[in-house]
Image: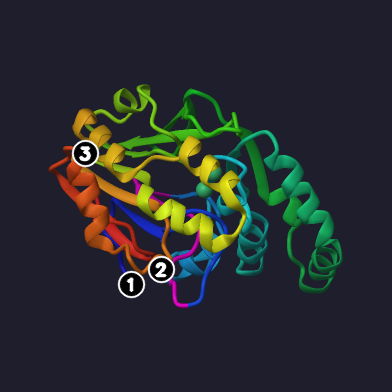
Amino acid sequence: MSAPANSVTLIGSKGGPAIYPGVPRMPTSTLVRLGGQSVVIDCGLGVTRGLVDAGMALRDLAAVIVTHLHSDHYLEFGPLMHTAWTAGLKRPVAVFGPVGLAACWQAFVESMAFDITTRMADEGRPDLAALVRLEAMDEGLFARIGDVRVSGLLNRHPPITESYALKLAAGGKVVVLSGDTAPFDSLADFARGADLLIHEAMIGEGIDRLVARVGNGDRLGQHLRASHTEARDVGRLAARADVKALALNHLIPVDDPAIGSGDWERAVRAGGYEGLLHVGEDGVVIGI
Ligand SMILES: [Zn+2]
Ligand SMILES: [Zn+2]
């Protein structure tokens, strides 16, 4: 399979960590191909399979960014690195993430010590621990991955404070990802004129039914409303930011038969956005 030189593949398009029978969507991860680089954003469950299905050879993995430490964004970080290692990865991968990601990685390597030391001795593989080069994220320009400049903006995702929106820019093309966030004003400036804005989205009417289904009552509903963005507000933001295209990801809910792709589109249009819209599905490739 070949993707356009500059493209985004939505690897996992659902919000939250749970997966359901009959729902093909997996938790969040995104592959951004820009300026000759492939950057993996978030590592939700299914990221490894999804990258391979998107045509990426795991031994070529070079850069990973984790936006925040909710499990639907990093549960499969360790397994992705380990599988890339068994697929022939030899060069260190630049990994950017919140402070706690280092402890997660260290604990993963320790939990797999038997397998890792066995394969190093028995198969002549390099030390897996040395293949991750963890680097800090920050607001403003915090990384250059080849020709790709990566900037961060702290978003609004209580109770987590270290949670980022991201902007990747190269060769005159700009991709912005909202990360998980409630609406906040400065995101419109951050995303202004982007070739593609990938924004999380939920449909409010589905939240009450979702809360009733999963059975942990009002707490989950309160979290979702305080920490995420309704599709109508995404439409408002995309119109204000004058982005050239909008993709919805991190969809909540995804297991409500009463909500279909037309509902997502109607909600975004009600917010005033009239441009190109992609309602995220796993594996969809969007040219930039
Ligand atoms: Zn999430
Ligand atoms: Zn989150």
Q: Position of residue 267 (x, y in %)?
A: 24, 48
Q: Position of residue 41 (x, y in %)?
A: 48, 48
The quadrant of the rendering that contains the N terminus is: bottom left
Q: Amino acid at mark 2?
A: Gly
Q: Position of residue 5 (x, y in %)?
A: 28, 54
Circles 1 and 3 in contact, beta carbons < 8 Å: no
Does residue 287 appear left or right of residue 136 in this picture? left
Q: Is mark 3 within 8 Å of ligand 1?
A: no
Residue 2 lies, with reference to residue 6, above or below; the image says: below
Residue 66, visible in the rendered structure = no
Q: Quadrant of residue 149?
A: top left
Q: Give the mark nearest the N terminus, 1 or 3.
A: 1
Dot 2 alpha-carbon crowd within 10 angstroms: few under 14, some 14 to 19, many 20 or more: few
Q: Quadrant of residue 96?
A: top right
SS of the residue at dot 2?
A: loop
Which residue bears the numbered disc 3? 271
Q: Say which of 142 and 90 sits in front.
A: 142
Q: Give the mark nearest the N terminus, 1 or 2.
A: 1
SS of the residue at dot 1?
A: loop
Ligand 2 falls in quadrant: top right
The numbered mark at residue 1 is: 1
Is residue 36 shown in magenta?
yes
Q: Position of residue 265 (x, y in %)?
A: 22, 53
Rounded to the nearest angstrom, the CA distance separating label 3 from label 2 is: 35 Å
Rounded to the nearest angstrom, the CA distance separating label 1 from label 3 is: 36 Å
Residue 284, visible in the rendered structure = yes
Q: Give the mark nearest the N terminus, 3 or 2.
A: 2
Q: Quadrant of residue 283?
A: bottom left
Which residue bears the numbered disc 2? 55
The residue lying at 30 percent from left, 62 percent from top is 3
